[in-house]
Amino acid sequence: MQVLVSNVLLVAGGAALVAAALRRHRLGAIVGIGCVSAAALVFAHAKVSVAVADATLGPTELAHARRAYLERTIARSLPRQRLSTRRLILNHTGEAGSGWFRRAHLGLFVHYGPTSAFATPTDRRWWHALDQGRSDAAGRGFEPDPEAVTSWVRLAKQIGASYITVTVKHHDGFGLWDSRLTGWDVGRQADLLAPLARECRRRHIRLFLYYSLLDRHEPTYALDKDAYLVFVEGQLRELLTQYGPVAGVWFDGWNRDFGVGRLERLYALVHTLQPWALVATNHHRRPLPHEDFRIFENRFPRNRVEPTGVPREVAVKLGATWFWGGAKAPTQIDRLPALLRRAERARANLLADVPPRPDGTFPPSVLAAARRRAG
């Protein structure tokens, strides 16, 4: 017998049945951990606990087993590089450091994931929902179409944006690419990042990857931050080695429990894998030593000169919510000129959020406003 209930896999039977269940749900098996019986399994899809026949893993055993599974998977399938804080002087366009970013002016922010299907006119639904991150609570009607992502890049071009920042993983932990480390993603057939990266290169739009450090699905996030760091590093290796050059990584969801040391380790990894990529975290504090720009969320800096000398970016919503909020929360593209003037006075780039519908397309009103702006 095998049943996947919420995030708990119940398995009873012989080795062949267990192996089939693991393959189907993309799980990892650990046998004989400490005092846990040999029937115990630890899997990549779980959130809280695992019950297998008459055996149950406690939080510590679960974290240790999950980490061992992650380390084996990463070692088997992903390239390893020694971390380094050294940076190449020139990026892939031949411009030094963050020079291009200081002149970018406008970027398109795209929030997209299962939360898009909830279509509520405020952010309360996706932020406060207790069931966020559970696979059985994914918004009904979320139907990602790899072909739809080309419209994201086309919209960026129409509104005059020089780069696009996409939520490849938000706080629910759902990935817009096919990850080897979890089954909570779009899967191989609907990988959105591959066509998005190709279209960005074709249209000369730079690509930033938004990655949430808060993860309400991955079990190690709540159990063991060092084990969770292994998971994050593994996913970053996937993102930064399989999809070509990226302009930067935009971290969100940081808190003090994760710590500055782990964050700086992630910066070193990004700069090692893609030395030309910029990196920053939306932590609402002064930039850390290895951050390449400073993020302001829904507010403009008061002073025109950044004390740390790094470029600045202001991320704003053009509607009532970051994700698609339905017809009652329209995206107001016509606000862009006024917001751009404010950003220019603050000597900052504007990162304007335009959320797609659950199928990945934009509503006609947004497309019409973008065409008007394009002239």
Image: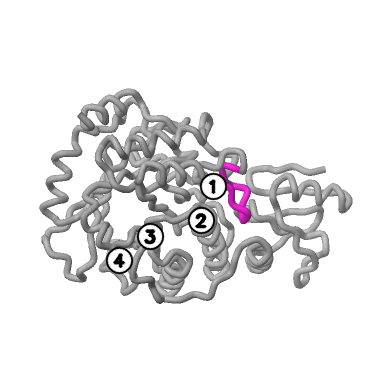
> What is the C-alpha distance between the residues marked 2 and 1?
8 Å
Magenta region, residue range: 176-187
- Decide which of tag 4 and tag 2 comes sooner along the chain: 4
Q: Which residue occupies the foreground of this view, 168 or 157?
A: 157
Decide if residue 353 is on the left or right side of residue 6: left
Q: Quadrant of residue 340?
A: top left
| Residue with the mark numbered 4 | 97
| Residue with the mark numbered 3 | 92
Which of the image's four quarters has the N terminus?
Answer: top right
Rendered image: mark on residue 239: 2
x, y percent for residue 7: 64, 48
- Decide which of tag 3 and tag 1 comes sooner along the chain: 3
* Amino acid on which disc 3 is placed: His
> What is the C-alpha distance between the residues marked 4 and 1?
28 Å
> What is the C-alpha distance between the residues marked 3 and 4?
10 Å
Q: Is residue 181 magenta?
A: yes
Tell me the residue at 18%/53% (across/down).
300
- Decide which of tag 2 and tag 1 comes sooner along the chain: 1
| Residue with the mark numbered 1 | 177
Element marked by disc 3: loop
Q: Quadrant of residue 318?
A: top left
* Amino acid on which disc 2 is placed: Leu
Main secondary structure type of the part rendered in magenta: loop
Q: Is 302 placed above or below 360 here? A: below
